[in-house]
Image (tube, rainbow, N blue to C red):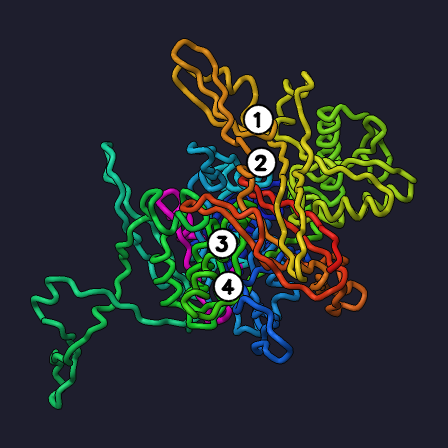
């Protein structure tokens, strides 16, 4: 360490005075640092290392044959209906990808990933469209309704862009470090971005993967309708390709020869040859039908208009990428049977292309609607491949069940553990007080799991920025039984997929009338709270019937009730100008409100029937057949242990859903043959907002 006596005195003086060291000492004291380093406000070397158990919510697998077979007729690895029961099952995961990545890297699923040869390829298209990434246009009654981000997505947007570039770089940096650590040693990553963040992204990737592992800067050039402006038209995105190490999978791709190349050389290629005299000459080597080696500039059309086949499949986000783009990436940097991943999956293009190309996949997203869109799309892919006589894999929906609040609530990173706990407690108290005022409930301090009381019902409030899980609800039921309470409400912005109504049925069996209610986003409007205008809506409700004839079960969906409101406040309606209209959700209806030229308001309901709310529904004809087994580390022994969570996995055996091309919905399932005896059926409905509700039906065959 080359420090002069003056340097040492200067350092000691700064330390004694509690002052930061001058910038130049960073390079003198830490000589091993790289020559060029990216620095931003709040940079930290700490990376999330939490391990949370994955809970399986649903398994989806189009049967390989329509009729149940007799004993011995099952295909190897499949049950009698041709549903996959062995080998790798693809993963579609709902949740914060930071926690998902940390849990994949450090948890029990890592062993499964390694047994498949490791994660060979990651493609990500992180949010760089500044706000458009969590919005979704929903077609209803010939009009378009814009679904706004839910509270979890709003928080993700705030965390990504709240401080501008600093917060975006912090968000992507930690996730890229986790992705690098999760990649196989011969794996590679493709990161998609545009002019907004491409400069930042290149520097972040250089720092994490190393400049020596940079492979390509791919330019995706597309065409769109030009608009007059005092700039060159923006018609390309950038995709950075990095390797984890020196060796990666690579399959050479080709493109058609240009007209000038064909004119000069014909349909041949040139190679070099060293003569006996040591000179180099170029020679023709004959016909080459593959074309020329593909360049790093790709001319691929964007998904064009509502008539596009890809957009008609299951729904889409405005930022959806064409399958042709992902096909090049997956073909070039992976082989059949390899595992690929996308941790910002959006509309599910990566998963769809990977399945068609015979790859295994993991896909995740924070948006519940993105998960639902991908689920529908992958069912469509399974059906398409089945019709073509091709192999396909089952996939399962997972989420993170046992959340830890400190990973979500933003407390000062520079504070001591005691100060962080104090800040966390203060923020939690403020949040709970706000919700109780909006709900018109009486606060109950020091009441265990309960926060308040209203009209003889105890009130428990879920976390501000994560779903209420089964664990949370079970603790409320347990507390009710301890205190001999018979009625309770749980208020939350989000509920875990598949939680309702199984948990309320379980509570009822234990003598507790448990109600789940959504907290509306309007609670953050102080004026609405003061005026008592906040309405807490019940979770949606399903009515369904099971019909049995000759041991064949048919399930009929008979009713579905929702209670949503979005943009239905007086202020939004008052801002409508003469001749304008607005589509909004109002007390469980989607309504088109228009103001004519004379200023008179007109209301036209677009959801004229309860079926208009249903986007997708599915049936599990034997819900108790597949228990959910959780693998988690025992803190006392450090060993992985398996235990039954008490839940069952919804096996998607029949489904009907809407696509952009086909808006029709079957309200009766296909007949399903069942053996005699008692049977528990599960019916799942996903509405046009992407929220799912489940109902159980008991019957005896």
Who is closer to the viewer here, 293 or 317? 317
Q: Residue furthest bottom?
A: 276
Q: Is residue 283 left or right of residue 382?
A: left
Is 520 magenta? The answer is: no
Marks 3 and 1, Cα distance to the nearest angstrom? 60 Å
- Residue shown at 81%/36% (left/top)? 488
State the residue at coordinates (74%, 55%): 699
Instruction: Give the residue at mark 2.
Output: 610
Q: Position of residue 201 (x, y in %)?
A: 42, 50
Circle nearer the viewer, 1 or 2 = 2
Q: In the rendered view, would you say 133 is above or below 250?
A: above
User: Mark 1 highlights which residue?
Assistant: 586
Asked which quadrant contains residue 230, the reply is top left
Instruction: Give the magenta-colored segment's residue range.
Output: 179-204
Q: CA distance from mark 1 to mark 4?
A: 39 Å
**Residue located beneath label 3 in the image:** 27
Where residue 281 sits: x, y (%)?
11, 80
Question: Which of the two residues, 566 or 211, is positioned nearer the viewer here?
Answer: 566
Q: Which quadrant holds the C terminus?
A: bottom right
Front one among 168 and 572: 572
Label 1 or label 2, whichever comes before in sequence order: 1
Q: Are marks 1 and 4 in contact (CB under 8 Å)?
A: no
Secondary structure found at label 1: strand
User: SS class of the residue under badge 2?
Assistant: helix
What residue is rendered at 62% in x and 48% in y? 556
């Amino acid at each position: 360490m080359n420090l002069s006596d003056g340097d040492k005195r200067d350092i000691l003086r700064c330390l004694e005075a509690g002052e930061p060291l001058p910038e130049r000492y960073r390079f003198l004291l830490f000589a091993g640092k790289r020559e060029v380093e990216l620095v931003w406000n709040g940079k930290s070397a700490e990376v999330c290392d939490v391990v949370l158990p994955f809970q399986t919510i649903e398994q989806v697998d189009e049967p390989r044959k329509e009729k149940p077979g007799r004993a011995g007729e099952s295909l190897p690895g499949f049950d009698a209906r041709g549903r996959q029961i062995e080998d790798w099952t693809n993963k579609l995961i709902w949740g914060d990808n930071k926690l998902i990545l940390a849990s994949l890297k450090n948890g029990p699923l890592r062993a499964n990933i390694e047994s498949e040869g490791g994660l060979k390829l990651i493609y990500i298209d992180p949010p760089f469209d500044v706000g458009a990434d969590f919005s979704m246009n929903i077609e209803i009654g010939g009009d378009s309704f814009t679904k706004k981000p839910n509270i979890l997505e709003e928080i993700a947007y705030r965390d990504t862009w709240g401080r501008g570039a600093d917060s975006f770089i912090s968000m992507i940096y930690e996730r890229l470090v986790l992705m690098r650590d999760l990649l196989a040693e011969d794996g590679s990553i493709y990161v998609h971005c545009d002019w907004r963040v491409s400069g930042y992204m290149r520097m972040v990737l250089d720092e994490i993967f190393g400049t020596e592992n940079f492979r390509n800067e791919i330019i995706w050039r597309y065409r769109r309708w030009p608009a007059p402006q005092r700039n060159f038209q923006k018609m390309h995105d950038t995709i950075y390709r990095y390797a984890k190490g020196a060796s990666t999978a690579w399959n050479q791709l080709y493109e058609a020869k240009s007209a000038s190349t064909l004119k000069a050389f014909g349909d041949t290629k040139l190679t070099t040859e060293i003569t006996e005299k040591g000179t180099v000459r170029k020679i023709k080597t004959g016909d080459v039908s593959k074309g020329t080696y593909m360049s790093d500039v790709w001319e691929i059309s964007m998904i064009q208009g509502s008539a596009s086949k890809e957009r008609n499949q299951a729904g889409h986000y405005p930022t959806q990428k064409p399958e042709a783009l992902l096909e090049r990436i997956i073909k070039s940097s992976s082989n059949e049977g390899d595992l690929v991943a996308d941790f910002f999956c959006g509309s599910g293009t990566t998963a769809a292309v990977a399945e068609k190309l015979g790859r295994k996949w993991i896909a995740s997203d924070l948006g519940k609607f993105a998960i639902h869109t991908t689920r529908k799309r992958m069912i469509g892919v399974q059906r398409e491949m089945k019709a073509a006589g091709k192999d396909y894999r089952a996939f399962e929906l997972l989420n993170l069940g046992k959340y830890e609040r400190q990973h979500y609530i933003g407390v000062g990173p520079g504070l001591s553990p005691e100060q962080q706990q104090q800040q966390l407690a203060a923020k939690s108290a403020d949040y709970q007080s706000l919700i109780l005022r909006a709900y018109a409930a009486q606060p109950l301090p020091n009441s265990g799991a309960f926060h308040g009381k209203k009209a003889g019902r105890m009130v428990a409030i879920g976390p501000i920025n994560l779903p209420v899980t089964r664990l949370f609800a079970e603790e409320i039921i347990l507390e009710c039984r301890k205190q001999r309470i018979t009625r309770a409400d749980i208020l939350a912005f989000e509920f875990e997929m598949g939680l309702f109504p199984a948990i309320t049925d379980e509570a009822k069996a234990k003598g507790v009338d448990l109600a789940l209610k959504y907290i509306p986003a309007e609670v953050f409007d102080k004026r609405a709270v003061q005026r008592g205008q906040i309405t807490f809506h019940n979770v949606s409700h399903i009515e369904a019937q099971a019909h049995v004839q000759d041991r064949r079960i048919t399930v009929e969906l008979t009713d579905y009730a929702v209670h949503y409101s979005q943009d239905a406040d007086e202020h939004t309606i008052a801002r409508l100008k003469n001749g304008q209209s607005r589509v909004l959700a109002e007390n469980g209806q989607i309504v088109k409100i228009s103001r004519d030229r004379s200023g008179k308001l007109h209301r036209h309901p677009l959801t004229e029937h309860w079926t208009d709310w249903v986007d997708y529904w599915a049936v599990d004809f034997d819900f108790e057949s597949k228990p959910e087994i959780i693998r988690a580390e025992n803190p006392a022994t450090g060993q992985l242990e398996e235990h039954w969570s008490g839940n069952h996995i919804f096996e998607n055996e029949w489904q009907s859903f809407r696509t952009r091309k086909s808006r029709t919905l079957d309200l009766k399932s296909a007949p399903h043959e069942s053996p005699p005896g008692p049977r528990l059926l599960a019916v799942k409905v996903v509405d046009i907002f992407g929220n799912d509700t489940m109902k159980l039906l008991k019957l005896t065959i």
